[in-house]
């Protein structure tokens, strides 16, 4: 998928980018890299630091820990949203289930885009706040 317009349409439908303008999303895409993985290929290895945000454009991935698959993600889903702001070692491996394309953006480039387009941060704040609220409610 090489068309910026198609990628903007995908990002507009992801909660992380809620409220971001098309111009902001287009600029974000311009500093991102698209990577394609074959079935079985690792995107991330367990116990390795990650500082990237990944958005699945096509295909399907799964996250595996020592006990097996934690979750599967497909198009318009994402991972790395917490480690992109605070790089950390991830406790699982991420593998492609089939030929999979992702959009990958580094923490430095994301911070730069947020400084140029603060509306990008709005969706991240909302998504992470909802997750904290759900976690808080479950623990009451």
Image (cartoon, rainbow, N blue to C red):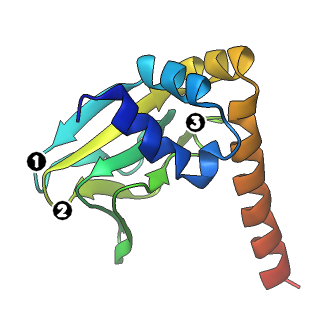
Q: Is residue 110 left or right of residue 54?
A: right
> CA gap, disc 2 to disc 3?
23 Å
Measured as percent of width and height from the top left, residue 61 is found at: 28, 59
Query: Eyeballing the image, is 36 above or below 90?
Result: above
Instruction: Give the residue at the far right of this rendering.
Output: 140
Q: Nearer the viewer, residue 57 or 9?
A: 9
- The spot of residue 64 in percent (x, y) is 33, 66
Q: Secondary structure at mark 2?
A: loop
Q: Which residue is located at x 57 percent, y 30 percent?
A: 22
On the picture, is 16 further left or further right than 72?
Answer: right
Residue 82 seen: no
Q: Residue at label 1? A: 38
Instruction: Say which residue label 2 marks.
Output: 97
Q: Residue at x 33, y 62 (%)?
A: 74
Give the class, few, some or many, for how many residues have Cα within 10 Å of label 3's Cα (few <14, many ≥20). many
Which residue position is annotated with label 3? 84
First of labels 1, 2 by sequence position? 1
Q: Is 14 in front, or is 43?
A: 14
In the displayed structure, 100 sits above or below 121; it is below
| Dot 3 or dot 1, earlier in sequence | 1
Circle 1 sits in a helix, a strand or a loop, which is it? loop
């Amino acid at each position: 998928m090489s068309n910026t317009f198609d990628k903007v349409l995908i990002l507009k439908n992801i909660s992380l980018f809620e409220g971001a303008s098309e111009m902001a999303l287009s600029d974000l895409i311009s500093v991102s890299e698209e990577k394609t993985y074959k079935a079985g290929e690792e995107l991330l290895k367990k116990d390795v630091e990650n500082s990237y945000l990944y958005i699945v454009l096509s295909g399907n991935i799964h996250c595996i820990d020592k006990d097996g698959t934690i979750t599967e993600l497909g198009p318009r889903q994402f991972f790395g949203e917490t480690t992109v702001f605070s790089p950390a070692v991830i406790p699982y491996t991420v593998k492609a289930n089939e030929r999979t394309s992702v959009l990958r953006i580094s923490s430095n480039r994301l911070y730069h885009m947020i400084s140029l387009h603060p509306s990008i941060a709005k969706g991240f704040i909302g998504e992470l706040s909802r997750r904290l609220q759900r976690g808080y409610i479950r623990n009451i």
